[in-house]
Amino acid sequence: MVSQFPRSNFFRKVADWRRAGCPIHRSPRALPGSNQARAPITSLTHQMLACLWFIAAGIFTSSCLAPHAGAATVDATLDRDSVPAGNGALLSLTITGNRVGQIQLPEVENLIIQGRDQSRQIQMNAGQTIVSLTCTYAVGSNTPGTYQIPPIAVSIDGQQLTTKPLTLKVLDAAAAQAPTPSGAPPAAGQAPDTSGKRFGFLTVELLIKDRNYLYVGEIAPVGIRAWLPEDSRAQLRSGIQPEGKAFTLHNVSERPQQGTEIKDGKRYTVITWYGGISATKAGKYPASLSLDATVAVRDTSAPKPRRRNGGPFDDPLFDSMMDRFNTPMIQEDVTLKSDDEEIEVRSLPTAGRPDGFTGAVGDFKFESADIPASWKTGEPQQISASLSGSGNFALLGAPTIVPPDAWKIYPGKSDLTPRDAAAFSASKRFQFSAVARKGGKQDVTLSFSFFDPAAAAYKTLTTSPKPVTVSGADLVDVQTNTPTVAPEPAKPKDPLVGQHSALTPVASLAPLVARPEFTRLLALGATLCVLGQALAWLRRRRTDPARLAQAKMEMATREALQAAANCADRRDVAGFFEAARRAIQLRLGALWNQPAPAITLAEISARIPAESPVARFFHEADLSAYGRHAADDRLPHWRSLLAEALASLTPSAG
Amino acid sequence: MNRPLRLAACLLLLGSTPLHAAASSTLEQANQRFAAGEYADAVTAYKQLLTSEGPRASVLYNLGNSYQRLGQYGPAILAYERARLLTPRDPDLLANLALARQAAAAFEETRRNPRIDALLYHFSRHEWSWLVVGSALLLGGLAGLCGVLGLPRRGWRNGALTAAALASLALMTGATALYLRGDEAALGIVLSATAGVRLSPFDKAEVLGSPGAGRSVRLGATSGAFHYVEVPGTSLRGWMADTEVTAIFP
């Protein structure tokens, strides 16, 4: 039977064209009731499509010639499971392999498959070229029902590969979607929404495995999803709020995930938060949540502009695309709400409830326990324990010590370390003080109880026994002889800690770092550092032995030179040479790092060239001392030679 | 020389005692109003005390409690945050602040490791500042001492080196803490649940979203009666009227 599309002539034409002989698509079997002698395609658009198919065939051929070493695969996927009648889903056929041959699309009664697009990707990896081809098709029907798309056969590399079969549900157009404009091709989300959720809605989903209920006090993970129509624009104006008082939301993730999903044949942008939900009373309550948002959607009910028939763009596909752009947006401040789906809350069983049960519901375990080994009666010591797991850590109390009558426990503190963003999984460390009341040796354990919702039973965990030694005498319980008074019913505790009555001193709210004093004080510290360093440098310089020795040598040299000058003034040649020689020896001693008196003419002759002023001066001194009588008329010459010799011995002269 | 100083100290003491007594009396009266359930009157009295005396941690804390009783979580969180600047480790304050945040669903984003945050927020920025300044002054003092005395004994030298190492460590820790908490100087608290972040600094500008009462926001430039705000952890940013958001540091 040939499918009938009274409003979709495009589908009919494409179907006719495929039957008339698509260059690639060859039906494996004849259409029931098909007419092979139908008129050929005359529309210019369809000719263009035919050209596209030929181009596609060319691409196939070229891909066959490309070097390829990857394994041949073929895969088919539908982008949605269901579509309203008259609309279409997108079928993607991905082919990887060399020499792609014929693609055999199966024929399904009342189901029309329309070629849309194809693309080719070439990947070069480690010298191998992998070519993959993706062909997309619009698949739809005007007749509601569930359609099985048989495996699609593709010839690749000479072998015949097939895809897995697919199922597409075509929904009743009246229920799912209003009729599309005449001749419009399958496309999702084009009809005006008559369900009252035109601007979107919320859904709440319990994320507990194998359960659709929760227990009182249990923080059950939930996924909260805001479904916004595709192409809409939304700005959230509030956080997610519970509508009723039955449930409390906990730790809703601040950074939601965003994606696109199909629901009832309509495409939505879905924003997903994760959090926890808990209830304090048993029963069935609607899990109603709300979210204020400003949403702008396309007004599909707006009148469409009239189009001229004929011409190159007289095509429903083109018209649909233009309609999409021309549709005006309408914006409203709305409150997105979830359906009042009821969630069952079960009370915790009273049977088998342990004495030390504090209301913890979840799955917990001991991570560590630290109990001191030596105790003295009456003296408190600290016990610490770590518990980890998932559940309502707020009601997870400190573990009790066993045997309880031998110990007195004082309230301690606890630290919670979340292990995920919503704090479902965490570890809690308890630290509390205990006093041993009985002396002697005993085995001590820590114990705590919780309700395991998965097992629907209470569980009590105990650490391995720790032998402890308690010195001192047993403590007498002073309360044992006091008359027992019936305990008053506990009042609900006010969580708000009360007022402070002591007047604290007036202080500036601006921290020191924000005041100019901060910079000044830092500058003072830096100045002190610099001053201290400078003083230390001066101190080191003043006590430096090398520097002191240098100064001493300079002083002695100056004295010797002064003596030489005095002798020269008195015409005392011998005294002049003695003083001058001492001055040169002192300077040489400092240079050569040896005692000045030990420096002889022989050493000077060996280490200093004979033509140097020092050697010449010593030579003159020796001649004057041992060779002949001194001629005092040469004193000016010797004085200038001395000056030259000393100048040559300055450190810079080397 | 000491006589005028002693006289001035006595006069200061004599002058401050009646002031302190008056402040204590006002605080007591405000607390009585709170206990009687007259929270709005208590708010007025606490605010009066803050205006006349200056910021006190106990008064700010009590003011926060009064606001919380009135269900005004934005101003309550603001008062608690200001009290936290003065007494960062007050367990009552931290408990009530957490309670207010929970009631207002104004949860703060945890950006760092919880242990690092616990260390960073154990001290106020004021205390961290003093740690930095104290360490710098200690280092300077040690350097000066070394310069003046020379520390001839080996024991003194080792002690000075140890103290300098500890001071350097404290200086670096404090400076790091101040750096990591540097953006707090520009933090503000949204006062009203309906406060909207607008696209432009005008009353009729499009509202982009509402962060919610008690939410911490980063304050930027001002334009007229509007602050540019960024809501941490979200992409929401725009202009907010200064009647709807107040800086923690006034």
Image (cartoon, coloured by chain):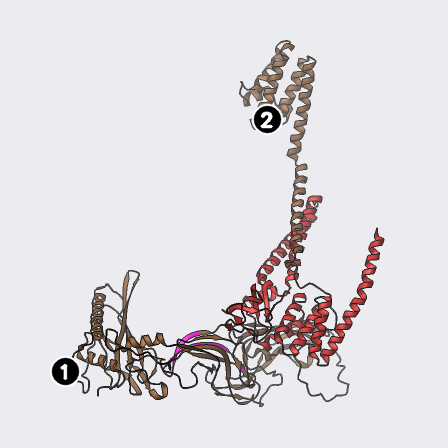
Residue A168 visible to the viewer: yes
Give percent across and percent down for residue A462. 58, 79
The three-letter amino acid code for the residue at tag 1 is Ala
**A507 shown above or below A384:** above
The three-letter amino acid code for the residue at tag 2 is Thr
Location of mark 2 (residue) = A650
Q: Tag 1 or tag 2, which sits nearer the N-term?
A: 1
Which chain can be seen in brown? A
Whole-number angstrom distance, CA of label 2 to CA of label 1: 121 Å
| SS under mark 1 | loop
Residue A164 visible to the viewer: no
Which chain can be seen in red? B
**A1 shown above or below B86:** below
**A283 shown above or below B197:** below
Give percent across and percent down for residue A79. 34, 77
By secondary structure, the bulk of the magenta-drawn segment is best described as strand
Frontmost residue, A639 versus A483:
A639
Location of mark 1 (residue) = A37
Q: Is residue B16 left or right of residue B169?
A: right
